[in-house]
Image (cartoon, rainbow, N blue to C red):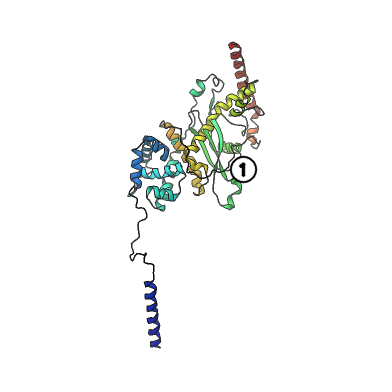
Amino acid sequence: MDSFINHWRKKNEDDDVFILSNLPTRCPATSETRQHHTSILTGALYVQEILEGHDERCKREFRMEPHIFRALVDRLRERSLLHNSKRTTVEEQVAMFMYTLAHNASNRDVQERFQHSAETVSRYFGKVLKAVNRLAREYIQPPSTITSPVIQNSRKFFPYFKDCVGAIDGTHIPITISLALQDPYRNRKQTLSQNVMVACDFDLRFVYVRAGWEGSASDARILQRSLEQGFEVPRGKYYLVDAGYANTPNFIAPYRGVRYHLQEQGRAQCRPTNYRELFNLRHASLRNHIERIIGILKMRFPILKVATFHPIDSQTDIVVAACVLHNFIRIHNGADIIEECNDEAEETILPDGDDTYGEDVDSMNSERNAGARKRDEIALQMWEDYCNYRRART
């Protein structure tokens, strides 16, 4: 019996020698792990190079000029929202975050660019996202009740829109969500999105943002819920809205069944023929601020144009963070003209917003008569002054 066991052991020892001797020769005979991120241009050096280089390069990579980037880092430090770690400064943490938003960069892209591990990239993205969102109350403020110079200095807008504090619209942002939860997020284009309500003033700053609503929710319904949960219109003031909302004293919409969009007015190639056409023309021109700010936001941060694989809560927070950053850049006089990225993924087909009000908000329906009277009062005065001006010129 012992001889059999010894023979079996001897045979297997010989087999082990054979197996070991035939292992691929490229496997190193060492327990040391080979370093993966070995570029001589470390993340810290890359950030330094960008911040000390041309402004346009910083705008392309981080979507803001170097002095604004440094101001953002300083503010996050002052508020104790971010701190240097043993290996990563706040500058590099913020740079990784901005690079992700600016280029819709994957975790792997950021690893390669900044020479950090997947875990490090993910951890600091979450930290900076949370920190920037903590700035929302500071940088997304209610509008001023003083008439905007945009209105005050325009014969077309003043005094008719003197009590207007801004414009509101809904914008769809692509979303990734589990199959079981998809149905409410499927919009009328049959793609998945969150419907985000945004309000802006005439300095092109966001004054309110409500993200995370399902893509199937109407713009009017989101506005109503926002009012129920703290959104306020200053006393005696109003916002401009499109035809997807009820026309009320606080939310003035264009006349239905009348040319409205600026493209429609341009194609007509004729002067307004009645007070409704004139009102819609000027309403569209002033409300165009909300379309501009949404366009700037999505051009600046292409991550908002495609569905990402961040957790659902993070996908909502990214929208708010982008609006905070937009306002921060505006406050520090940053440029709005942002080059389109050529490296972004294919965009999702999304609705532009609700074309008509579905009369699905009872509390707004009850205010429509008062809204109609207020709109007519503005439009008729506008038309009278317009006709007098035309007669004076002939």
For image coordinates 39% across by 81% down, the residue present is: 11
The residue lying toward the viewer, choosing from 245 and 177, is 177
Residue pointed to by mark 1: 189
Please tell me in which quadrant of the rendered image residue 374 appears: top right
**Is 394 rendered above or below residue 262?**
above
Please tell me in which quadrant of the rendered image residue 268 appears: top right
Image location (x, y in percent) of residue 48: 33, 41
For image coordinates 50% across by 38% down, the residue present is: 298
Image location (x, y in percent) of residue 337: 46, 33
Q: Quadrant of the C terminus?
A: top right
**Is 270 rendered above or below residue 312?**
above
Q: Which amino acid does label 1 sit on?
A: Lys
**Is 243 rendered above or below residue 274?**
below
Q: Taking 2 as reference, is 358 left or right?
A: right
How many marks overall? 1
The residue lying toward the viewer, choosing from 311 and 56, is 56
Please tell me in which quadrant of the rendered image residue 233 appears: top right
For image coordinates 40% across by 86% down, the residue present is: 4
Image location (x, y in percent) of residue 73: 37, 39
Q: Dot 1: what SS?
A: loop
Inspect this view and state whether residue 147 appears. no
For image coordinates 51% across by 35% down, the residue present is: 295
Inspect this view and state whether residue 369 appears. yes
Q: In which quarter of the image is the N terminus?
A: bottom left
Q: Taking 71 as reference, is 244 left or right?
A: right
> Badge 1: how crowded within 10 Å, few (<14), some, or many (20+)?
some
Image location (x, y in percent) of residue 9: 38, 81
